[in-house]
Image: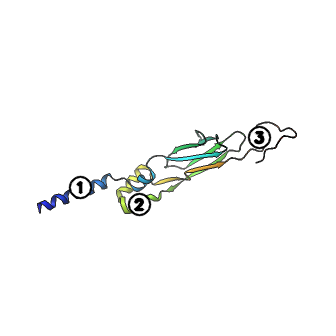
Amino acid sequence: MKRLFGPVRACALVVAGFAVLSPGCATVVGGAKDQKVTITSDPPGAAVLVDGQSYGVTPAEVPLSRKTEHVVQLQHPGYEPVQVSLKRTLNPWLLGNVVVGGFLGIVVDVCTGATHSLSPDTLNLKLQRTANPASGPSTPGSPTLSQ
């Protein structure tokens, strides 16, 4: 009986250690930190502003907090500015805790911020030319710009 108790105890310790050290499903699959949002534009080179803060020009990969919604704005000389909202959505991988992670997995996901993701996670925006481009007045016979 003593010999059987040793392997059972070892197995119980391994299972308990796995339960304590295993992260939540949403954390493993979706990531625990900021979400990287890819932003491209046509034409490229548009200034990227997220919540009023500059993040360079397109194409860009911007790390954003999953804990709040964000407003992305693109600006390019000669083009109308474009504004898009990134919404928080429930991360479907959170439900994996029902099968694998249990209550502890849910706690880990809540603590790491992985319970939500930003949608969309990729923006590919086509900018429209302004009605009056900044290049100056057109001369007779010159091509006109269309929107």
Residue 39 vs 15, above or below: the answer is above
Disc marking residue 13 = 1
- For label 1, the crowd category at 10 Å Cα-Cα, with few meaning under 14, some 14 to 19 and many 20 or more, is few
* Disc on the earlier residue, 2 or 1: 1
The residue lying furthest to the top in this view is 136
Q: Quadrant of residue 6?
A: bottom left
Total tally of numbered discs in the picture: 3
Residue placed at 75% from the left, 44% from the top? 130
Label 3: state its secondary structure: loop
The residue lying toward the viewer, choosing from 13 and 112, is 13
Q: CA distance from mark 1 to mark 3?
A: 70 Å
Instruction: Using residue 124 as the reference point, say whether residue 35 is left or right of it.
Output: left
Instruction: Using residue 142 as the reference point, say whether residue 104 is left or right of it.
Output: left
Q: Amino acid at mark 3?
A: Pro
**Residue 52 in the image, given as x and y percentages of width and height:** 59, 41
User: Quick one: quadrant of the N terminus?
Assistant: bottom left
**Residue 20 in the image, given as x and y percentages of width and height:** 30, 53
Residue linked to disc 3 = 133
Instruction: Using residue 142 as the reference point, say whether residue 87 is left or right of it.
Output: left
**Residue 3 in the image, given as x and y percentages of width and height:** 13, 60
Residue placed at 34% from the left, 53% from the top? 22
Residue linked to disc 2 = 96
By what rule are the colours in the image chosen? rainbow
